[in-house]
Amino acid sequence: MIDPFGRHVTYLRVSVTDRCDFRCVYCMSESMTFLPKAEVLSLEELDRLCSAFVRKGVRKLRLTGGEPLVRRNVMSLFRNLSRHLQTGALDELTLTTNGSQLPKYARELVECGVKRINVSLDSRDANKFAEITRWGRLEQVMDGLAAARDVGLAIKINTVALKNINEHEIDEMLRWCGEEGYDLTLIETMPLGDIGGDRVEQYLPLSTVRERLEKDWTLTDIAYKSGGPARYVEVGETGRKLGFITPLTHNFCESCNRVRLTCTGTLFMCLGQKDAADLRAPLRASEADEQLEAAIDEAISRKPKGHDFIIDRDHRSPALNRHMSMTGG
């Protein structure tokens, strides 16, 4: 699949649920209203949709949420999708998780061909973690990380940089990741959805963070690509990779190879634009996939060149009404 700007679309992020067992302050409001279960695609429908994208050239699938591992019987979807790894049609099947369910599912994920995972962790201070997640307990995530490491999963920590909340922990997070053998990616908060707070007070440019880190760490730009939007450096003192995802200070649109599918079958061709395509209707219109594949082609033909996010005192409202939990970031 090639979009109007010559970019090959090879990466599909699939939100399997909008539900989560945490309520992170940058992602959703504390009193979220979730989708009625009748609107959510079945696991069999999600498999069929993902498989259509694989046939059309997607090489990387990432399951997200919400929290993907709270979806009932979600491991059956991982097991079914793993057939594309076995045939060589798919290079990678992975997920982004908050880690709370990994003690239960880590071993089974490995059995399904998952080799590496992203774990969201914004603070290693138990009280601060509870403040950021509202409902979460740090112990849950630490137990999940231990379970993942015990079965051989490679782990990358995702940390959203938040001004006056966790910004003074980033240096220590980098040190800890080096000691534990984890890579780390820092992410700028994004203006998506009403979160019940002021994003101007949260927003911390990663250009500022990098300047601070370079006072104590040797950061060397490297060409490594994970298949996503992060730009990476190597941390000389630890030998680990540090990624920067910068949708505001330095967007990554020129190399965007991604589209996002929600758990209702809505395809967003760009994280920062409203334009979307309904794939549920053609999916359910026929047991054959001709209509579905035609709808995918039409959607890719509308993939925009990029987005422009702004967070400042003149742009306090979210750029888009949908929450991060709808598309998994």
Image: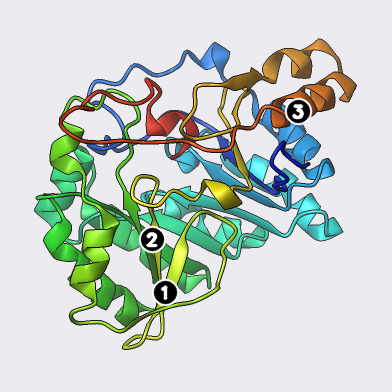
Residue at 83 percent of width and 23 percent of height: 294
The residue wearing badge 1 is 233
For label 3, the SS is helix
Query: For the residue carrying disc 1, how many other residues have a C-alpha within 10 Å: few (<14), some (14-19), or many (20+)?
Result: some
Residue beneath label 2, please?
244
Residue 192 location, x and y as percent?
35, 30
User: Which of label 3 and label 1 is nearer to you?
Assistant: 1
| Real-space CA distance between mark 3 and mark 1, rounded to the nearest whole angstrom | 35 Å
Amino acid residing under circle 2: Phe
Q: Between 200 and 98, which is closer to the camera in this rendering?
A: 200
Mark 2 neighbour class, 10 Å CA radius: few under 14, some 14 to 19, many 20 or more: many
- Residue position for label 3: 296
Query: Which of these two is toward me, 135 or 96?
Result: 96
The secondary element bearing badge 1 is classed as strand
Q: Give the side of residue 269 with respect to residue 8, left or right.
A: left
- Judged from the image, the secondary structure of the residue bearing numbered disc 2 is strand
